[in-house]
Structures are given as C-alpha cells and as structure tokens.
C-alpha cells in the first residue's frame, strides 16, 4: 500500500470555511467565479466500510476567486445516506458497489422505495447548473438540489440550440430501454427510446450537432438480476466481449436510430467529444480494453499491495462512416487520459483541437493517476504537468474573457501533495501548461470526480 496517495481515499470529517487560502504565484485577476467540485468525502459509517471509490458519501468543495484571492469551503451533501447513516451509525442505502441489505425483503424495499423516500441520493459524481440552480448528480434517477452558497445523473450535455440539457436514463424492467430526453427548468421531454434486452452500463454519451451517440459496451445486465441477485448494483453486470461494442446513433430531431455500428469490445466511462465531418461521425472516448478498471477501483485494491496499478485508458477516435456498419479507431495520444475535459462551451459537438485529463506516468507504473495531460489532437502532441508524489484531479478549463484561442484561459485542478498530506488548487496556463499559482487547503481533499466553474 502506498501511503503517498492512500490519504486521497480516506475520510475528511471536517467541514470548514476559509476566507483566504495562502497562494503561491499569481492567480489571474480576471478569474472571478467559483469552482464547485464533487466527490466522496466519507468512506465508512460506524464499523461499516464502503467498498468502492464511487461509493463514498458525497462532499462538495467550493473554491471562489476574486482579485487574485481564493476562498474555500467544503460540506457534505445532506443526502439520505448521509443524514440517516450518521444518525443510525450504519450504512442504510445501497450504492454503486456497496450493498448493506442482507435480505431479499430489504432489497425490494430499497429498490422500490416510494418517491418521497428516494432510494439513493448520494449524488457524488458531477454538478450541473440548471436555471440558476446547482444540481448534484450520480447515476441514479434522482438528482439532488443544493445551494452553492451554503454548499447544501452524471454526465448530461447542454444543447445550445435547444437551450436544454440532454441526458438519457436506462429504464430497467422486463422491457428495458434507453430513453434519451431533453430537460430544462420546466421538466423533461422524451426525445427517443430504444428497446434493449440486456442494457449496458454506460456512464456518459456523445453528442454532435444533430445526433446523440450511445456506446453500448459489452458490460451488460439481466434487468431482473439487479432486483433478485442480492449483489450490489455494478456486480450484476457481466462482461461479454463476444458481443463487441455497439454505437447507437439517435437523431435529436425525431428520436429515430439512424445508424448502428459495431466495433471490437471495449469499455469507457467517459466520452471526450464527438462531431460530424463530411457525413461521418467521429466519436472520441477514453477507452479501456475491457471493464476490469471497475474492479481495480475497489478501495481494497487501490489500497492493497499492488497499489493504484490501473489499466491504461487510451485516447481513441472512432470513425462511424456514413452508410457504414463498422466503427474503427485510431489512437490520438501515446499518453493515457481519464477524467477528460475540453473547452466545452466553444467546442462540444464540433471539431476541436485540445483535450485535458489525468493520466499515469509510464515511468511510475505502480503509482496512482499522477499527472495532468493536455493533448493536441491536430498536431498530435502532448504537454504534461507532473510533480513527484502529487496526485491531480480532473482538470477544468476556464476560458479567459474575450478569448479567441481554444486554449486561451486556465486549467484548475485539485492536487493532493502526497508528501505534505494536504491538497492544493493548482492553476495552470492552459496554453503553455505552465504553473501560474497554487492555493493550499489546510487538509487532504479525498480524490473526487467532476466539477464545474460558474461565473
Ligand atoms: Fe464521470
């Protein structure tokens, strides 16, 4: 077990507010907004432990910027698992890979809890803004609202033409389906539905100007098994590589499936971007050769003797040719990439040049994700930020005011300094990838997932 990054998987009980973090370097004066981040903050309740990185109780972190100064606050999301768990001293709700329910009766009660008692709302994955309100998201159907000032699903897209969010829900039943819908502050509208016998685990999806692209990895579930098996959610999914992967292309206009493409088996959590080019669709993903990464992210493995050795996720571009039925890929970088981000506002759904992410240095194969990467997919070049025993999280791009260049702005990333046992907010110049500043937090922020920057 490596004690350098193990702290990133340990509980942070303290909720604090710091009006002014110590800053080294210079935070650009134009940075005047708030970075909100989400992730697990607590990995056990009483004597019971959560088993997987994705299970921990959601904690929100807020970094606010003003005149080169940085303030910080963190709060647990007051979800049912948090409030009832802390009150009773027991894990009360089933999560991604941890299931406290022992009997079938309890399992049924958990899955079919009435709407006023949401089965799971430990929304620890992402944050979006909807009509001025911030929503914390996970992969269950019930997003949790919170107030960013008091810090009180997981990868939707935003469609600037429809002025609406786009997301999908997998409906699990004897007649399962993938349902794609548009949503705004007034509610949601079904765009299209696709029947499926054995639904796949899909953590995100791609969206171009006219299409939604669902990639059905061969990690699939018999819907009844989730109900009856007695296993935690993700352990019901079975890797069936003989199926290969399937790209479903749905028209945003009428919800029809306009193309289906097959490829070799692979798995991904995250789409990077997708766009249309001369009738073809190009779909960029952070791809794993199989789904073993899910098992590698169990806390017992991450903190075990093999440390954080993770399968490499490749930056792949799949081409879906007009009128074709087969998707083939090329690799866009030699570096691995995960928790990918782009200049979303300017480039999502369109041709783009730069992506940012975390990866693992090849020279440190027994380490956890330990560097930031910037990939130029046009020039096929990569820049990295690395510091010994430091573990950066998802890099969020913030465009400079009146920016014209795609990478004109800064990158914000929360980094664990494994030697000092403290985290800091790193500010990089997005173009050069040079450090501009770091603001030190007085504790370790457990490794999180996603966040947003709000002006
Ligand atoms: Fe994610």
Image (cartoon, helix red, strand yellow):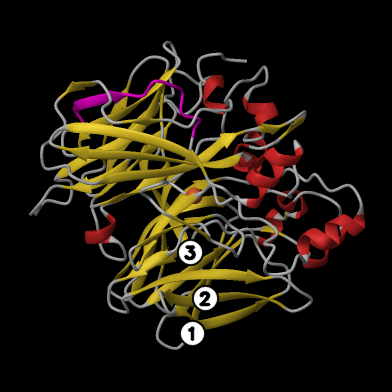
Q: Is residue 143 above or below residue 123?
A: below
Kindly report which numbered mark, 3 or 2, lies closer to the viewer in this rendering: 2
Asked whether 340 falls inside the magenta stretch, the response is no
- Give the CA distance from mark 3 to mark 2: 22 Å
Which of disc 2 and disc 1 is earlier in sequence? 2
Please name the residue shown 80% across and 44% down the image. 100
The quarter of the rendered structure image containing the N terminus is: top right
Residue ranking furthest to the top: 419
Asked if residue 382 can be seen in this view, the reply is yes
What secondary structure prevails in the magenta region? loop
For disc 1, the marked residue is: 255
In primary-sequence order, the first of circles 3 and 2 is 2
Q: Which residue is mark 2?
A: 180
Q: CA distance from mark 1 to mark 3?
A: 21 Å
Are the residues tagged 1 and 2 within 8 Å (C-beta)? yes
Pointer 3 residue? 327
Residue 440 within the magenta-colored segment of the rendering: yes
Chain part drawn in magenta = 433-447
Which of marks 3 and 1 precedes in the sequence?
1
Residue at screen point 75% across, 36% down: 89
> Is residue 284 something one can see in this rendering?
no
Cα gap from disc 1 to disc 2, whole angstroms = 8 Å
State which quadrant residue 139 falls in. bottom right
């Amino acid at each position: 077990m490596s004690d350098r990054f193990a702290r990133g998987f340990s509980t942070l009980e303290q909720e604090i507010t710091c009006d002014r973090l110590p800053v080294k370097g210079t935070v650009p004066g134009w940075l005047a907004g708030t970075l909100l981040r989400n992730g697990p903050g607590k990995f056990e309740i009483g004597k019971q432990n959560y088993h997987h990185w994705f299970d921990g109780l959601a904690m929100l972190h807020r970094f606010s910027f003003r005149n080169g100064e940085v303030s910080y606050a963190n709060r647990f999301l007051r979800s049912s698992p948090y409030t009832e768990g802390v009150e009773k001293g027991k894990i009360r709700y089933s999560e991604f890979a941890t299931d406290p329910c022992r009997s079938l009766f309890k399992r049924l009660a958990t899955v079919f809890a009435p709407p006023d008692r949401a089965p799971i709302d430990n929304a620890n994955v992402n944050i979006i803004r909807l009509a001025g309100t911030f929503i914390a998201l996970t992969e269950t159907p019930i997003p949790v609202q919170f107030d960013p000032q008091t810090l009180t699903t997981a990868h939707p897209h935003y469609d600037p033409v429809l002025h609406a969010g786009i997301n999908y829900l997998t409906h699990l039943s004897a007649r399962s389906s993938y349902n794609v819908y548009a949503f705004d502050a007034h509610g949601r509208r079904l765009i299209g539905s696709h029947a499926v016998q054995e639904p796949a685990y899909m953590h995100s999806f791609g969206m171009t100007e006219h299409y939604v692209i669902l990639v059905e990895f061969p990690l699939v579930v018999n819907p009844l098994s989730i109900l009856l098996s007695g296993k935690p959610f993700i352990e019901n999914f079975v890797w069936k590589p003989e199926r290969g992967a399937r790209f479903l292309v749905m028209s945003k206009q009428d919800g029809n499936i306009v193309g289906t493409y097959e490829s070799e088996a692979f798995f991904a959590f995250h789409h990077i971007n997708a766009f249309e080019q001369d009738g073809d669709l190009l779909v960029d993903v952070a791809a794993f050769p199989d789904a073993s990464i899910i098992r590698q992210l169990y806390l017992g493995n991450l903190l075990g003797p093999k440390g954080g050795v993770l399968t490499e996720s490749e930056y792949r571009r799949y081409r879906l040719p007009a009128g074709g039925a087969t998707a083939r890929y090329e690799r866009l970088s030699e570096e691995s990439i995960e928790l990918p981000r782009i200049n979303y506002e300017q480039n999502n759904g369109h041709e783009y040049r730069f992506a940012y992410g975390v990866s693992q240095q090849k020279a440190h194969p027994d380490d956890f994700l330990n560097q930031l990467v910037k990939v130029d997919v046009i020039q096929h070049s990569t820049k990295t930020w690395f510091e010994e025993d430091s573990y950066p999280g998802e890099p969020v791009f913030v465009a400079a005011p009146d920016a014209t260049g795609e990478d004109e702005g800064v990158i914000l990333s929360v980094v664990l300094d494994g030697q000092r046992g403290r985290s800091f907010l790193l500010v990089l110049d997005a173009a050069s990838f040079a450090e501009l500043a770091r603001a030190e937090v007085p504790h370790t922020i457990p490794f999180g997932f996603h966040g947003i920057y709000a002006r």
